[in-house]
Amino acid sequence: MTRTAFIAIVGRPNVGKSTLMNHLLGEKVAIVSSKPQTTRNRIAGILTKGEDQYVFLDTPGVHKARTKLGEYMMKSVRSSVGSADAVILIAEAGYPAGDIEKELIGQIEKAELPSILVLNKIDLVNREKLAETISEYASLHSFDAVVPTCAQNGKNVDEVLAEAEQFLYEGDWMFDGDSLTDQPERQIASEIIREKALRLLSDEIPHGIAVVIEDFKDEESLLRIRAEIWCEKESHKGIIVGKDGATLKRIGSYAREDMESFFGTKVYLNLWVKVKEKWRDSAAAVSNFGYKNEDVT
């Protein structure tokens, strides 16, 4: 008898949602960086164990949307919660619940969904602070479980999975047993490139970057990819390219290494940098760069 469940992972930016999901899966599916708002799309990570299939939905960090891209991201969060069977709310240990966490708790209660509270980054707080955080959240909502973790090193992630088992129900799987994610290969490639740009560029630039895969050809033992990195200012283009193309070469080198590991084949990667001013404020540009409203409901 097969069992399954869709479980949304929600929280504020940079709290560890993608890191948690990657550890739950035992594979890197969602990109990770120290920059907030790294995740832009809802990403399904699929874990199949025996007769059970968990579908974890990694979502963008909840923030006040100031652009069309931000509006798309927040719609994606609401849609993920609305379509889920259960929710994992991840928050930072040692800090009181803010407006974002209270808003998410409100969404959980409105949808009448079972939920787990994961208090992350326990390596940065003492036991007293952790106990205070648990007590405060308990006063706000009756979670089905509370699990303190350090997602970065995988501490207690197995407990999160053990608690999530209670949300499984008898039913057909939505994905094949060997599936790892619902993301198409082009999307995975573009996200790998964006991750490397996030890690290598200064703070003001990454939020204005979009990566579009223009060509994706599988030629037996070689994957040939042509990608465009779009930014919002001509000055940013110069920074992304770097002196004598050095920064762009590093982005490409690191991205190619990850792609070869993920796809299991040699990769030829051709990167170009282009400018589209204020694209995040343009609904048409946001859609053209792959953030389409029909992807969320």
Image: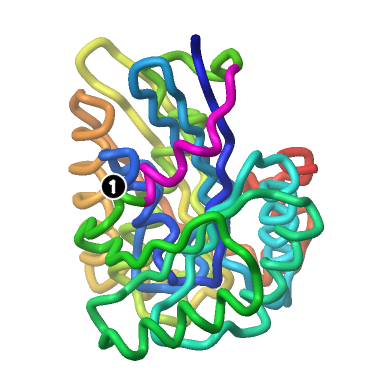
Residue 16: image location, x then y, percent: 40, 65
Q: Which residues are magenta?
A: 160-170
* Secondary structure state at the residue bearing disc 1: helix
* Near-viewer residue (217 or 88): 88
Residue positioned 41% across, 55% down in the render: 18
Q: Is residue 242 visible?
A: yes
Which quarter of the picture shows residue 32? bottom left
Amino acid on which disc 1 is placed: Asp
* Near-viewer residue (283 or 52): 52
* Residue 50 versus residue 10 in the image, above or below: above
Residue positioned 27% across, 48% down in the render: 255
Residue at mark 1 = 158
* Residue 213 versus residue 10 in the image, above or below: above
- For the C terminus, the image quarter is top right
Magenta-drawn stretch contains 274:
no
Q: Residues within 10 Å of mark 1 (few under 14, many from 20)?
A: few
Residue 40: image location, x then y, percent: 56, 56
Residue positioned 27% across, 27% down in the render: 263
Which quarter of the picture shows residue 246? bottom left
Residue positioned 31% across, 65% down in the render: 149
Q: Is residue 274 visible?
A: no
Residue 132: image location, x then y, percent: 44, 87
Q: Report whether 167 appears left or right of 242.
A: right
Which quarter of the picture shows residue 138? bottom right
* Near-viewer residue (264 or 211): 264
